[in-house]
Amino acid sequence: MGGPGDADAPNERIVGGPHSSPSASRLPAPPGGHGGSLGARVAIVGFGGVGRELARLIALKAGDVERLYGVRVRVVAVVDSRGAAICPRGFEGYELLKLAETPRSSVSSGPCGRPGAGVEDVYAEAKPEIHVEATPSDYESGEPGVSHAFKALGEGASFVTANKAPLALRFWDIIGEAAARGLYVGYKATVMAGTPLISLLRGLRGYELHAFEGILNATTNYILTLMHERLLTMDEALETAKAEGVAEPDPSLDLDGWDPAAKLVIAVNTLGYRLTLREVYREPLRARLEDVISASRRGRVLKYIARFRPRDGRAEVRLAEVGGDSFLAQAKGTVNAVRVDVGVNEVRLAGRGGGVDVTAHALLSDILEAARGWVPP
Amino acid sequence: MTLDAIVKIGGSILRSPGDYVKAAEAVREYYVDRGARVAVVVSAAKGVTDLLVRAVEGSRRAALEVKERYSAIARDVGGPSLERLVGELLGALDRVRGRAASARAAARILALGEAASRAIMVYALEAVGVKAVGIPAFRVVHSSGHPLRARIDYGRTGESWLSVVKTLTPSGAVPVVEGFVAGGCEGTPAILGRGGSDYTATALAALSTAKTAHLVTDVDGIYTGDPRRIPGSRRVESMGYIEALEAAKYGAKKMHPRTFEPLKVVRPLEVRIGSWRRWTRVAPRPEVRPPGVKLVASRALGSGTVVSLVGSGAASPMILSKAAEALMEAGVDYMTVHSTPSKASLAFTVNRDHEARALEALHSIIEEGVAEGAGEA
Ligand SMILES: NC(=O)c1ccc[n+]([C@@H]2O[C@H](COP(=O)([O-])OP(=O)(O)OC[C@H]3O[C@@H](n4cnc5c(N)ncnc54)[C@H](OP(=O)(O)O)[C@@H]3O)[C@@H](O)[C@H]2O)c1
């Protein structure tokens, strides 16, 4: 996709497509457009819960999105660990919905399926302009996300990700590479499942950061909420969260604090800092019911909090007590909340912190920003 | 962007793999081949919801039985790939250990029977040459309220459903949505209560351009009396919504109490209740036809039984006197007489031993000729 003011960006202009009625768009016409829509060729890499939900969302919303925002989103490929489905003309809505109902690891059994094909084939054949990364977050190697990020940027595609690992481990390398090429990196979906903290933080650049603190993980907040409200032990609360589908069958990345730590790194780096994942002090969540009860008696609440203080560079993820009336105490269940103290102001944001549906919406929002040539971060 | 009918396939006609294919053939024969645009709402296979209720209470055996039954059906209808897909959809059943931890967890389990049935129905339709695609209910049917007794949110559901219909129109594919299930708070599944598939079907019909909602079951319609107990019972040709609801209330037909709500709140249309070829037509208002009594029904109440006459004219003085006379002649004593504000029923509480006689006596006053004529494919 084109960088800022890049009128010669390889964006296809589609004038008067079947659904287009650009006059109704809420946004000004795209740069260089003549009232037509911008084409956005998207590859979805990683086709589990999030990737499928994004495919469904695009299938069902493409018409509205084009009408409102002047961008015609077309998925040209989807990839899982065993193969791909590649369609250079762009999948129809029906085909995307069919792909979304293939069994796991079997996207290649759907329309335009290609067993064994991978990201290389996708770039060679379908020339995506926007790469959506929805593979698992691996905080040791960063793979496959890191390689995919550089592959995408190297191919001239903007990089939009739900996978946190590439940015948690290689934030500035990826941002630098994108900037050098005038490409966009979209990662709203990585933090607070898309409640747009990242957009908010971009708007706080230039302020002096005093403190950043927040609840950045839905599973652990849900567990603590159950402990407080129903007086369950942590094990019982975890079992309940699993039974309700709120916690993954293996929730170790959440309980050990990797997930909120990665989000803290991404958020803080968005404000210009160079915090690494290794620098975050992490205490795995081990909450005891007696501590919950004792805190409650004193009008306080236990929360699993991610914090960064630039003054001493301290970054941490740990269980902490907050006042029962405080902003963070109000974030219950899977709601996440962040408080950013910038001296002259204190800005707060709360919203859902998990769920494939919200995550997919955040990815779509980033796709639109990428397509419209948003200024790279 | 139009839909002619919603066809709801009830669990009573889904007992075996062959039944799925038969139902799919009927959708083709009675609708698709006749040029009608349809959407299919599907229930869980016969008996599955009862097993899931036991699974929610902690029965691992019941959970496994559901898996086994669906595996066998899936294998037969769609081979190994469908079997895998259904296995993935039912994954949460593997983790049933003890009673469901919460209403949300229970809803998640109860919703599985319909989800698996939806996947199987898609394959069955495709196997008989009907292009079809599954739409997970919790992505289109939005709800509010308790997760086990949720109410459909017509506004949000209408928008989502419209985009499904719009997306699939160019391909001509039939959307298949599971009944009974809805999206609850924060993207978790909720269920609509027993018989909720009918409610899903009438809601999706009212929220589209459909002229009919056809609720297909294993009987030909609503009868003037239970044919196994009352010789001479005939199918009722047509009824009004209020009459149908009263009939349901007094036990003539199992129906969700909100089945007709969308038709009152959103848009009226015709509901067909019966088999593929024969049905009782339920329209907004009954055709007035003296004496306006359509059927008899009975329901246990405490130690006695409520036997009732249902029909728009049931509470008229003439019917009351005829009924009292018929009961007297049959030697039935009644304890109370009751009518509802809608005046579409007249109910007598009788001794349980008198139930059969009372029903026969009341049935004798239903006028000849209520069942002939319309209501045939
Ligand atoms: N779930 C949420 O609410 C949420 C919210 C925000 C962010 N995220 C992040 O979003 C990402 C995706 O989450 P998810 O829940 O969708 O995970 P998921 O269900 O496990 O899906 C991961 C997908 O990535 C595929 N994959 C794995 N390795 C691959 C490779 N080398 N090349 C191509 N594809 C590969 C998997 O393929 P197979 O199907 O073949 O296994 C699968 O399709 C994760 O990084 C997660 O942290 C999730």
Image (cartoon, rainbow, N blue to C red):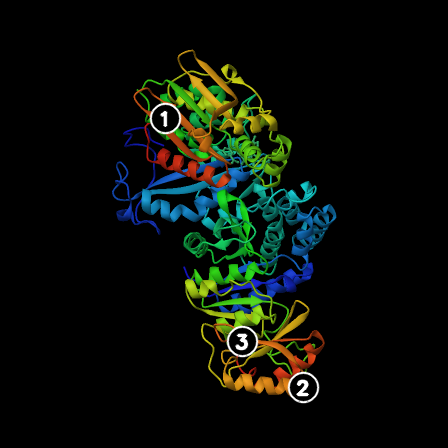
The mark that comes first in sequence, 2 or 3, is: 2
Asked whether the viewer can see residue B365, the reply is no
Based on the displayed image, in which of its 4 quarters is residue A343 positioned? top left
**Which chain does the residue under circle 1 lie in?**
A
Q: Is residue A137 above or below residue B276?
A: above
Q: Between marks 2 and 3, how big is the CA–CA gap? A: 20 Å
Could you confirm whether marks 1 and 3 are on the same chain? no
Residue A101 vs residue B152, the one in the foreground = B152
Instruction: Please state the chain letter of the residue tagged with numbered disc 2 in the rendered image.
Output: B
Give the image quadrant in which the ligand numbered 1 is located: top right
> Which residue does the numbered mark 2 point to in the structure image?
B330
On whether ligand 1 comes within 8 Å of the CB at mark 1, the answer is: no
| Residue B340 circle label | none
Seen as rendered, the residue at the extreme right is B61
Kind of residue sitting beneath label 3: Ser
Q: Which mark is residue A201?
A: 1
Q: Nearer the viewer, residue A47 or A285?
A: A285
Dot 3: few (<14), some (14–19), or many (≥20) neighbours within 10 Å? Answer: many
Q: Secondary structure at mark 2?
A: loop
For mark 3, give the secondary structure: strand
Residue A209: x and y in percent read 36, 18
Residue visible at 58% across and 63% down in the picture: B9
Q: Is residue B96 left or right of residue B288?
A: right
Pointers 2 and 1 within a single chain: no
Q: Position of residue A195 (x, y in %)?
A: 42, 34
Which quarter of the rendered picture does the N terminus of chain A lie within? top left
Q: CA distance from mark 2 to mark 1?
A: 82 Å
